[in-house]
Image (cartoon, helix red, strand yellow):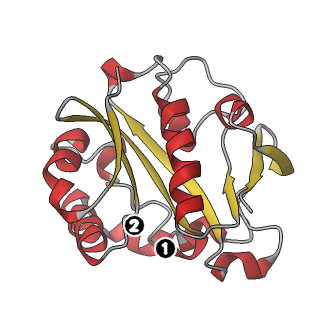
Amino acid sequence: MCSAVLPLTPELWPAFEDLFGKQGACYGCWCTHFRLPPSVRRDNDRQRNKVHIRSRIDAGPPPGLLAFEGDRAVGWMQIGPRADVPQWNNPGRASAPLDPGDGGDPGVWAISCFFIRNAARGGGLSHRLVAAGVEFARSRGARLLEACPMDQSKDSRSVGLFVGSTRVFEKAGFTRVAERKPGRPLVRLPLG
């Protein structure tokens, strides 16, 4: 059971590093997929990705939330202004902003990625992270919060669910505003 959800600050790096493990979660991504251009990602290895996210965490503000069971991190959700995840804004992506200006608007935020320990999956942790994320974004002045989840997956352990499940967002009050790729709606929650 999740005991706390906290913004990822530099002092929580050891918990984040433990959660992502030696491989760096999702084939060494270290949650850089939406932060780095494809050419850089192709040239990077897991160590360079780790250095990149560590420097981003050290620079602040927190790029996401960690969920804990006791003192062990069991889940991660990347959340912040759209500008912090520039690849999420590419016009060819299902996650591209409806208004191109939203990509640089500090009031338009995105939930772009999840990583949950295998043992913690299927127990509602994504719901808890999204609820905490709504409050986190609101407390930092966001007026819109968006995500681009997937509609269906074979089960809660699917690697493809790194973007989240549509039903989790709909349960939290998000509504569909576009669907550029079948099964990958852009969903939005006004926070104002």
Number of disc labels? 2
Residue 73, image x, y percentages: 25, 37
| Amino acid type, label 1 | Pro
Q: Which amino acid type is marked by label 2?
A: Arg
Q: Which residue is mark 2?
A: 41
Identity of the residue drawn at 26% across and 62% down: 9
Nearer to us in this view, 165 or 190: 190
Does the residue at mark 2 contact the one at mark 1 (Cβ under 8 Å)? Answer: yes
Location of residue 25 in the rendering, given as x and y in whole percent from the top left corner = 31, 43
Residue located 50% across and 73% down the image = 84
Q: Position of residue 108 (x, y in %)?
A: 67, 69
Q: Residue at x 75, y 43 (%)?
A: 174
Above/below status of 109 relative to 102: above
Front-most of 109 and 161? 109
Which disc number belongs to residue 170? none
Q: Which residue is mark 1?
A: 37
- Is disc 1 placed on a helix, strand or loop? loop
